[in-house]
Image: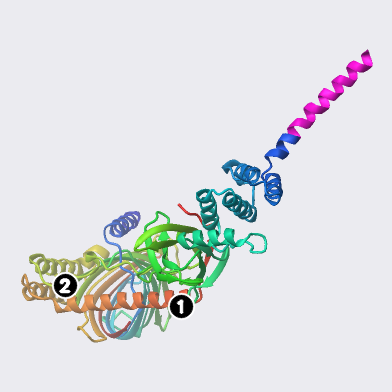
Amino acid sequence: MALARSTRFLTVAAMALAAPATAARAQNPADLLERAVRAYQDLNFDAAAGLLRRALMPQLADSLDHAGRARALTYLGAAERFRERRDSAMAAFRRLVLLDPRYRPDTLVFPPEVTRLFDEVRLRTKTVAIRVPDDTVIPLQRGSFAAWLVPSSPHNVTVGIARGDGSPLRELYAGPVGDSLDVHWDGRDSAGALAPRGRLWLTVESRVGGAAMRVVEVPLELDYALDTVAHPAALKAGQLLPERASRRTGLRSLAGGLLIGAAAVSLPQIVAPGQRSSGTRIAVGGTLALSGLVGYLAQPPGRPLPDNVAANQVRREDWRRRTDAVVAENARRKAGASFRVRAGQSVAP
Amino acid sequence: MTGLLRWIGVALAVGCGVAPVAAQGPALWAGATLVGVRAQGDGSLGPARTAGTVLGGLVTARRGKFELEGRYLQGVLQPQDDASPRRDLVQGQLVLGFRATPWLSAHTGPRARSYITPAGTERWLVWLLGGRVESPIVGTTVRGHVELWRALALSANVGSDVGRTGRGGDAGVTVQPPGGPVWFRLAYGIDQNAVRGAARRETVEEFTLTVGVRRR
């Protein structure tokens, strides 16, 4: 009696432990895909379609790799085709084309009626696959970032670089794309300046009849090690002399001459009070005072001040020379610099 | 002396605050000077008055806000009375200047002066600190300057170290015709150095005419 109870308990416990494993296997998308393929091969298209739809449900499909999803969609389209559900088959094939525009069903596995329907869908669906290097370093001069575009079928595209906020930075190509297309970007915006560091987007817009049909984007992370020299600050008004005399110009000259002249005359009293000093200081003080008077008379308001104009010209030329030197130095540094582009997975917003 | 230093410090701080100096490229001035020197010495042996015209030269190098100036004078000072001896004068100076603004600068450095007489050589060494105000008078062609300094340290081989003081000043006008490298300067300077312990006081006036060239 006790033995029978123990046996029953162990059986129930074993079933309880085994049940989740069985259920998990049943929910495994890879397992579902294998069962669906077997059902398809057994011509049980209804069961195959059911299993494939379960495998392609969003929460499960994420665990399928790219090839697995493409395989599942191909079998789903084929199964729906044989279930005489043409629209469902075309929808599956459209998802397949968008997933991978370069994908083609194996003609040894799928009969012509399936591949013909796929080709029909592919020709109607305009999208592009973008292949870019994951991480690349490119010389800033004479180098370029290359992207390889493969369309689902020939159509017109517009290829560009956009800023992180989506605003356009540079158009790289606009025109037809046949079998494939290489586009190159030199790391600059449409004005020829270096693109800003940080997040950018490589955008490919598929167009049909002038209207945008689909946009595929690849996030790019742009960086470059470029240590440039800052340009000299622009000359401020305070750094240049007035080029025309004002009323204050003459007064300042007069005051300057008189004050410095008075200082010259007073120096013995300041430095050596009580000491008998020579009269030469009067000559210097008088010269200074006279210079001030000449400055006052020679600079009436509005009169051009050629000395100041010449002095300003020297300052401007000096500033220009320093600026040219900085520009030349920066050009030299840029010649040896490179930029780095790291690309992410393409997305279709 | 503390008052003068405080004045210079305040003036430089104010000057730096209100009128930053534009970055300037290097420039070099060199000139030959003709100096009329009048020296009055007061001491225990009575006054000594000498005067003469001596020759010298100066070189100033400026880069950014800093400038370095060297001056040299050498000549003979003749006695101006029967009691004074003839003296040979040799004077050298090297000062480092800092231009806080285009019109205000400070400078410091040593000035050495030797009087050579039949009785021996008397040496005065002053480490000076001063301020200089410079102002354009007629455009940039004619500029005036005035400068005052005090002795931070003074040494002289006059027999005592007690009560050493020194101060001086200089004012003048510089003419630089536009477009040319040549410049002229007329200046008057006076300094007085004293060692109270030795009852010595030397007052020297200089009337300087300089002709020089400037190279940028």
Q: CA distance from mark 2 to mark 1?
A: 45 Å
Left or right relative to A94: residue A162: left
Local secondary structure at mark 2 = strand
Q: How many marks?
A: 2
Q: Which residue is mark 1?
A: A332
Which residue shows up at 53% across the image and 62% down it? A119
Which residue shows up at 50% across the image and 61% down it? A120
- Highlighted range, magenta: A1-21
Percent x, y of residue A260: 18, 68
The answer for which chain carries disc 1 is A
Q: Nearer the viewer, mark 2 or mark 1?
A: 1
Is residue A212 visible to the viewer in this orientation of the structure?
yes
Percent x, y of residue B29: 32, 81
Percent x, y of residue A110: 64, 59
Q: Residue type at mark 1? A: Arg
Left or right relative to A300: residue A104: right
State yes or no: residue A13 in magenta.
yes
Local secondary structure at mark 1 = helix
Q: Residue type at mark 2? A: Ile
Q: Where is A7 relative to B18, above or below?
A: above
- Closer-to-camera residue (B208/A79): A79
Which quadrant of the rendered structure holds the N terminus of chain A?
Answer: top right
Q: Which residue is mark 2?
A: B137
State yes or no: residue B35 in magenta.
no
